[in-house]
Image: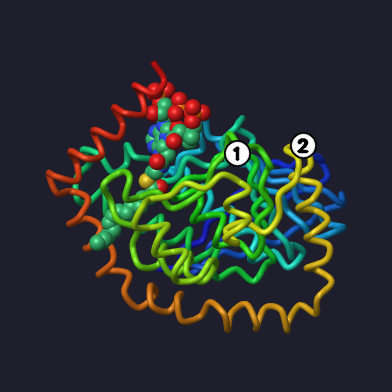
Amino acid sequence: QKLTFSLKIAISSSLSKIHLNVSHGRLCASSTSFSQRNNSSSANLKVDHDQTTGVAVMHMQSPPVNSLSLDFLTEICITLEKLEMDKGCRGLIITSSQPKVFSAGLDILEMYGKSPERCGEFWKAVQEMWLKLYGSNMVTIAAINGSSPAGGCLMSITCDYRIMADNPRYSIGLNETMLGIVAPFWFKETMVNTVGHRNTEISLELGLLYKPAEALNIGLVDQLVPEDQVLSAATQTMTKWLAIPEHARQITKSMMRKSTIEKLRSNREADIQNFVNFITKESIQKSLRMYMEMLKQKKA
Ligand SMILES: CC/C=C\C/C=C\CCCC/C=C/C(=O)SCCNC(=O)CCNC(=O)[C@H](O)C(C)(C)COP(=O)(O)OP(=O)(O)OC[C@H]1O[C@@H](n2cnc3c(N)ncnc32)[C@H](O)[C@@H]1OP(=O)(O)O
């Protein structure tokens, strides 16, 4: 049965509108814009799309810490799909509107005390976000204006380039082992592809979170700038990347990432089963509970 629905997105200019049509599971965007800037918002995301430069800035605004819940992941995936389909969008900058935090990573509450079915649905959304970002044809830049542990770090390293605020209060890394959980193979491979095998081995086994200067030193981020310049530096870098012949850049990106992406694509169901079996174990649930208590105590 043909599935067709239309979603109208309010845009700042009353003259502009975008229609998203989902037909046979594919999402297509058609734009009748008379303005050069499209601003769209959903519950926890604000997207500023400058049609002149072809660059969209996606601001995560899911209080308090942009943790990636099923709902938030779904919102992110819909937005990424829409931007990917929009020929007028060639570059994406991801940043945070929350103070001091880029993203706290996966929402721990989605992994604690939930049914296996719900855990499976959640993990599928995590996979989907990674597949969309790591396989994007757009130039993607993470403007990391706060801490970025675990899933927040994953999101950053799916991007083509990372610019972080030079603030020693912030940290970034795949710290899963500190929660008593294990980063799956595609988190690990994204990290290896970014900082190499040895750095990843040390980093994952010890669950390390790096201060900005340390992250720069191992190549986990590409550039540090003063906090108030993160977005402008990302915009400048984007201009350079967009000046490269597009087709050649896209093919090169695909060549570098294809084998990692294929490995997950062809094992999605098994990976979901692994996750569900692992996360619903009593011992793992206990580790997550203790970690959440530790987070609360840190506050008190
Ligand atoms: C064999 C293997 C097979 C299969 C795979 C199996 C395994 C699973 C792999 C799973 C991969 C997991 C990836 C993840 O991303 S796990 C999440 C890891 N995240 C963290 O460790 C970050 C924890 N948070 C913090 O460190 C701090 O909150 C942060 C981000 C530095 C901000 O600090 P601060 O500004 O001081 O804010 P608070 O700490 O006071 O936090 C405010 C509020 O938010 C709650 N919170 C924080 N982080 C999370 C989170 N990730 N999920 C849910 N909730 C979070 C925190 O508890 C506070 O809540 P409160 O109610 O007290 O206000």
Image: 112 above or below 271: above
Residue that sits furthest to the left in the current view = 282
Image: 255 above or below 59: below
* Labels in figure, total: 2
* Residue where numbered disc 2 is placed: 228
Which residue is depicted at the point 35% across and 78% down? 266
Which residue is depicted at the point 35% across and 23% down? 296
114 displayed left or right of 292: left
Coordinates of residue 4 in the picture (x, y in percent): 51, 61
The quadrant of the rendering that contains the C terminus is top left
Mark 2 residue type: Asp
The quadrant of the rendering that contains the N terminus is bottom left
Q: Which mark is residue 184?
A: none
Residue 228 shows in the view? yes
Image: 192 above or below 112: below
Coordinates of residue 156 in the picture (x, y in percent): 56, 55
Few, some or many residues within 10 Å of mark 1 (<14, 14–19, 20+)? many
Residue nearest the viewer, comparing 129 with 279? 279
Residue that sits furthest to the top in the current view = 300
Residue nearest the viewer, comparing 20 with 186? 186
39 displayed left or right of 121: right
Few, some or many residues within 10 Å of mark 2 (<14, 14–19, 20+)? few
- Of helix, strand and loop, which one carries label 1? loop
* Residue where numbered disc 1 is placed: 146
Queried on whether the Cβ of the residue with tag 1 lies below 8 angstroms from ligand 1, the answer reads yes
